[in-house]
Image (cartoon, rainbow, N blue to C red):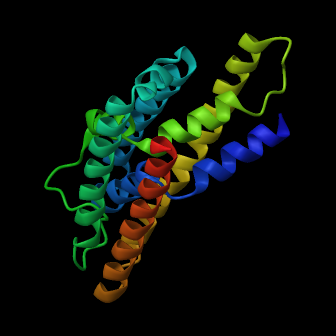
């Protein structure tokens, strides 16, 4: 179980579309709107878990044409977000939007987030610690995953709100936006490669 907990922490703490966009919503719109978006991400990630646990994700990804289409749609959407982040200018918001994305935006992001599928497939198909009780193991994994997921995402939301309050110089804000966009592109590339191979 300890290796599972460590894997969850390492896989969730690395920058991905969910945490980067959450930090961006926090920076742009503050805690209240950030929490609404966080709720959407939470619902979305659990829907992804459900798809992985029921085999729906594997069934969809088993069809090569559908897998390529879904990967291209996901990568396209996330690359568009990365572009928006990189060219948000000197305003540290990571995402330039007139209004916060809300719960629906969080659900949508997780639905097309290839990292969410790769991480959940890795966590639920590996790290067996109760081979004689697979149902109990899956329930424990869900509980552990959700507790750590919420904790890590709250830290990213706090980070986004805190960065905005620092009133950094425009060039520093622009550099942070570019680094966050490059991190998102890197995650999308790795997750897409894992999905397509």
Res 27 → quadrant: bottom left
- Residue 142 in the figure: left or right of residue 94: right
Residue 77, x across and y down, in percent: 26, 48
Residue 106, x across and y down, in percent: 34, 39
As displayed, is residue 176 above or below residue 2? below
Residue sitting at 50 percent across and 24 percent down? 58
Residue sitting at 69 percent across and 31 percent down? 144
As displayed, is residue 187 above or below residue 52? below
The residue at the far left in this view is 98
Q: How many marks?
A: 0
As displayed, is residue 166 above or below residue 25? below
In this rendered view, identify the residue nearer to me: 95 or 195: 195
Residue 75, x across and y down, in percent: 32, 49
Residue sitting at 47 percent across and 33 percent down? 45
**On the rendered image, what quadrant is the N terminus found in?**
top right
Res 131 → quadrant: top right
The residue at the far front in this view is 64
Residue 128, x across and y down, in percent: 80, 27
Residue sitting at 40 percent across and 25 percent down? 63
- Residue 55 in the figure: left or right of residue 84: right
In this rendered view, identify the residue nearer to me: 50 or 20: 50
């Amino acid at each position: 179980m300890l290796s599972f907990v460590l894997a969850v922490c390492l896989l969730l703490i690395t920058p991905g579309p969910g945490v980067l966009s959450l930090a961006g919503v926090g920076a742009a719109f503050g805690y209240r709107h950030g929490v609404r978006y966080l709720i959407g991400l939470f619902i979305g990630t659990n829907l992804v878990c459900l798809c992985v646990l029921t085999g729906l994700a594997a069934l969809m990804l088993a069809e090569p044409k559908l897998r390529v289409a879904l990967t291209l749609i996901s990568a396209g959407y996330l690359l568009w977000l990365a572009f928006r982040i990189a060219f948000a200018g000197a305003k540290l918001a990571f995402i330039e939007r007139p209004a916060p994305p809300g719960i629906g935006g969080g659900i949508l992001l997780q639905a097309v987030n290839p990292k969410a599928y790769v991480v959940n497939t890795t966590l639920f198909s590996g790290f067996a610690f109760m081979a004689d009780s697979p149902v109990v193991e899956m329930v424990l994994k869900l509980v552990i995953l959700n507790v750590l997921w919420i904790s890590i995402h709250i830290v990213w939301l706090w980070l986004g709100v805190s960065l905005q309050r620092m009133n950094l110089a425009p060039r520093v804000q622009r550099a942070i936006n570019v680094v966050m966009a490059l991190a998102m592109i890197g995650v999308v590339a790795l997750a897409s490669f894992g999905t397509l191979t």
